[in-house]
Amino acid sequence: MSDKDYTYAVARIRALEVSLFSASVLEQLLACADYESAVSFLLEHGWGDPQLENDGETILKTEREKTWKTIREMVSDMTPFDVLSYQNLFHNLKAAIKGVCTDGVDPGLFYEGCSISPEEMVRIVKEKEFESLPEFMRQAAAEAYETLLHGRDGQLCDVILDRAALEAVRDAGEKSKTGIIKDYARSLLVISNIKMAVRCCRTRKTLDFMKRAMVECEELNVEKLMKAALQGEGAIRDYLNEAGFKEAADALFESSSAFECWCDNRLIETIRPQKYNPFSVGPLIAYILARENEIKTVRIILTGKQNGFPESAIRERMREMYV
């Protein structure tokens, strides 16, 4: 589709953006007395499906399905959106491999709406038909399968597939002519590498492990980041300050929750300029990412309510909104 072909779709997205939860609406949800009243609040605001038995998880799943259904109704070519599903697609591959190798596939672990259905993914793994997968998945799928089947190393299986997912996103960003896809890919690589460095630091992983887990990107010197992770979180913060990521360093110093929030908020800042873009696929991609962020934040609130967390503990985990 050309940019002008998106004119109607962007106009419809602009109308839908009005119904995205603002920070003030989330404060109202947070103020609900308990989990049940929070679920009722969501239903009153049009979330979920009145024909379903609506618990929190069902509501969130329904909202995600609504988002993709809306996009499919407006756009004939879904190819520009493929990159947004790569991580879910690799997650499903991971779930299929673990299920097949342990003889216990759990349907609840799979994401719907990917280019390969959960059932087909399980069949491919069972029959070791990895050539049926997209080219960017084949080698990692075979390696991860053999690693888990013969080595029983679940962590290495995860690392192989998570790295392949990031490489697929990076490559898609480099090949794309669409600015927001390039920006999305760059931001995701930065966030993922910093998260991995912090995780490896806290679990005392070796340099060799980090080299298998982390992916080269333009914005970060991954080698310096890995060496910093070997020295401790203080060294990671020093490197982040040096590399121009002071906010990430400050958030990491503050708390794990603050750091997780920074990671998601950076992605929202990446897509926010699309609010002022009248044409192109950009606003549609931004809307999908904004909805994912909204759903994640609502899940944080519901989980907090369900577990009886105080409002202050939930609020510090809440993400910045697109609107």
Image (tube, rainbow, N blue to C red):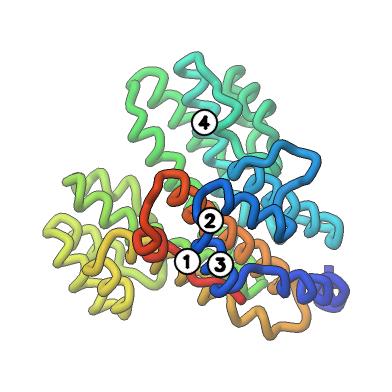
What's the residue at 32%, 71% (across, down)?
248
> Looking at the image, is mark 4 or mark 2 earlier in the sequence?
4
Task: Check if mark 4's residue and mark 1's residue have beta carbons within 8 Å.
Answer: no
Labels 3, 1: front one: 3
What's the residue at 53%, 58% (across, down)?
32
Residue 114, horizontal then vertical, whole percent: 68, 43
Q: Badge 1 is on which residue?
A: 319
Labels 2, 3: front one: 3
Helix, strand or loop at label 4? It is helix
Task: Check if mark 2's residue and mark 3's residue have beta carbons within 8 Å.
Answer: no
Q: Badge 4 is on which residue?
A: 95
> Looking at the image, is mark 4 or mark 1 earlier in the sequence?
4
Depth check: give the residue in front, 206 or 263.
263
Task: Check if mark 1's residue and mark 2's residue have beta carbons within 8 Å.
Answer: yes
Label number found at residue 28? 3
Residue 314, horizontal then vertical, whole percent: 40, 59
The residue furthest left is 231
Q: Badge 2 is on which residue?
A: 296
- Examine the rendered structure and indicate whether residue 185 appears above or below residue 240: above
The amino acid at mark 3 is Gln
The amino acid at mark 1 is Arg
Helix, strand or loop at label 1? It is loop
- Give the quarter of the figure containing the N terminus: bottom right
- Give the quarter of the figure containing the C terminus: bottom right
What's the residue at 15%, 66% (across, down)?
235
Give the CA distance from mark 4 to mark 3.
36 Å
Labels 4, 2: front one: 2
